[in-house]
Image (tube, rainbow, N blue to C red):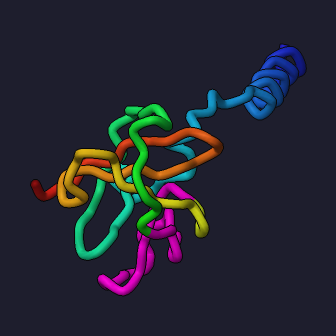
Amino acid sequence: MKKNLLLIICICILLMGCAKEKENPIQENFVDWVHALVTWKGYSYVYKDETVPASTIGEKIGEVDAYDNQGSRGYNDEHVFSNRYPVGSELFQLKDVPESKSITVLHDGVYYKLDNSQP
C-alpha cells in the first residue's frame, strides 16, 4: 500500500512539473509592477491592450534605452524606460493626438497605444 501511495505521489509531482504554463506576452516575467509601462520625457505611459493601425502613426519620437522588469532599479527623466518593452523598441507619435496624452510603441510589428497615467 505504501509503495502505491508513493508511486501516485511521484507521478503527480512529475505531471505538475511537466505542465505548460499559459503564456501572455504582455504579462510575462512581471514581479513588482502594477502596469506595463514606458516612461518618456518625465511621463509614465501605461499599456492598455489597445493596438492602433499604422495609418494613425506619426513621427518617431524615441526608443527604449533602459529595461527592467524586476523593479530593482530607479530611472530618471534622462532615460526612456520600460518594464515590458526591450531596449531598442521604437516610440511614435499618434497623428492628431498630443504626446502628453498618448504615444505608441512598436513591438513585434504591432503598434500598441500607451496612455499617459497622469493626464
Residue 63 drawn above or below residue 46: below
Residue 30 drawn above or below residue 86: above
Q: Quadrant of residue 31?
A: bottom left
> For this rendering, which residue is in front, 58 or 28?
58
At 41% from the left and 66% from the top, the residue drawn is: 61
At 84% from the left and 13% from the top, the residue drawn is: 1
Q: Residue 33, how many percent across, how many down?
A: 36, 56
Q: Residue 23, how many percent across, how many down?
A: 62, 33
Q: How many marks?
A: 0
Q: Residue 43, how many percent across, how many down?
A: 23, 67
At 44% from the left and 42% from the top, the residue drawn is: 112
78 sits to left or right of 66:
left
Residue 64 drawn above or below residue 90: below
Q: Quadrant of residue 37?
A: bottom left
Q: Magenta span: helix, strand or loop, mainly? A: loop
The magenta region covers 62-85
Residue 69 on the magenta segment: yes
Looking at the rendered image, the quarter that the C terminus falls into is: bottom left
29 sits to left or right of 17:
left
28 sits to left or right of 57:
right
Residue 20 drawn above or below residue 39: above
Q: Quadrant of residue 2?
A: top right
